[in-house]
Image: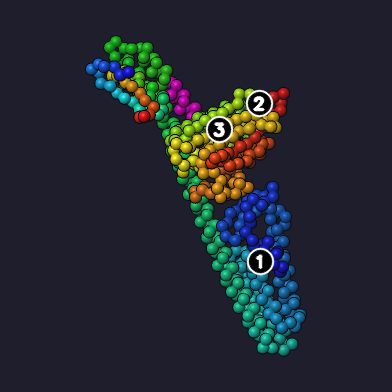
Amino acid sequence: MAPPLLKAIFQPAKKGTFARGFVVTGWTTGAGGIRSQNLQAMGGAFFLPLTTAALAAAIFAVDTITDLEIAVPVFYTAIVLLSFGFCKKSGIVFVGVGCIALTLLSDLLTANTGVSEAGVINTALSLLAITSITFLAVKIQSSKMAASEAQSQLAHVVRVTTLGELAASIAHEVNQPLAAAVINGNACLEWLAAHPPNFDEARRAVVLLVEDTHRASHILAQVRALTKGSTSEKGPLDINKTILATVALLDGEIQRSEVSLQTQLSNDLPIVDGDRVQLQQVILNLILNAIEAMSLVAAGSRDLVISSANSDSKGVLISVQDSGAGFAGKNLDCIFNAFYTTKPSGMGMGLAISRSIVENHCGRIWATPNSPRGAVFQFTLPMGQELNA
Amino acid sequence: MIENNDKPVVFVVDDDPHIREALHGLVRSIRLNVYTFATTE
């Protein structure tokens, strides 16, 4: 087997090199890299086993027919290595035993040609090599499976932790208006219990109470909209309103993180045709990333600027700019790839989902370094043609 | 300016303007002087 082909088969898949349409079905941290349905789509499910079988047959033929004074069966190790790509542990053992059987069969078939000392040594060396490689392949496959399981467990823990943090954040956001409603209710009772009752103040307290409960309801409605099904429901959209609604949702987080927020929203933007919930997800993700990136810099220097403007292509340009650590040491080409993350607890899905949503809206998303420090994430959305006609 | 009378004074510090307003009304309803602040600075 030619080394480049072996290399191509066994080299871990590089992130960011997939063609469009690649559907990731599994994730391993071992040598296997990413498996994909594309392999099956192109007939890969049968290609590799058939190639392996053909190669084994070729080795058997050369070993049996020719009278070379070399250890031809050693090449069976390539068969074992190839089986690593499409077999589980038991399969690899089966292939290894099969290779040993073929080696012995070949020896048996060529026994009448005379047994030389070199031939016996070659066979013994070959059997030793095949056994060793099979053993190592089984061990590696076991480690790969263990690593894969650990990875999925870790991902589960991260999801649960993220969910917990999100729940705590939502609870805080909802608790504030509810607490205000309770206080206003008590104030109303006090005004009514006074001698004489102060109806004007009581009425004012009730008005505030009603506003507070509406505010709590509004927050819950926004949360529900964010977690609603992912089917796209596009319609006429004022992107500035979408930005402001998202910022309102993160108001508590922004204050807790001591981030100075500045919004620079253009007044003469065209209406875009988009899914409000999905675009809120994009903005939310970019803002949360920015806040997290700035968590390591001094509290007084955390500047978050969210802006909207007309884009060159007659659409809108949305920009989220932070003063965090920036992209030092990070590969800008990879940051939008699925599972690419530089955070210890990150899943690497946020920006990938964001790009998917923006591209689904016929837009484009990219990132550039900010000056003097930090990052700028920008995305464009095309103008809704009929809406602005 | 803080009123100079015999009533106790309550100072409220909360970053949420709605909570501040609500507490302002509640403390006034029990006939106390109240002053609200967004921060301690």
- Number of residues whose C-alpha sits closer than 10 Å to that of mark 2, classed few (under 14), some (14–19) or many (20 or more): many
Q: Secondary structure at mark 2?
A: loop
Residue designated by label 3: A306
Where is residue B5, by image quadrant? top left
Residue designated by label 2: A270
Q: Which residue is rendered at x = 60% and y = 53% of the image?
A: A26
Q: CA distance from mark 3 to mark 1?
A: 52 Å
Q: Secondary structure at mark 3?
A: strand
Q: Position of residue A27 (x, y in %)?
A: 58, 54
User: What amino acid does circle 1 point to?
Assistant: Leu
In the drawing, does residue A244 fall left or right of residue A78?
A: left
Q: As drawn, which residue projects farthest toward the right? A: A65
Q: Which residues are magenta?
A: A210-220
Marks 2 and 1 belong to one chain: yes
User: What amino acid does circle 2 point to?
Assistant: Pro
Chain of the residue where label 3 is placed in the rendered structure:
A
Give whichever of discs 3 and 2 has the lower sequence position: 2
On screen, residue A109 above or below A193: below
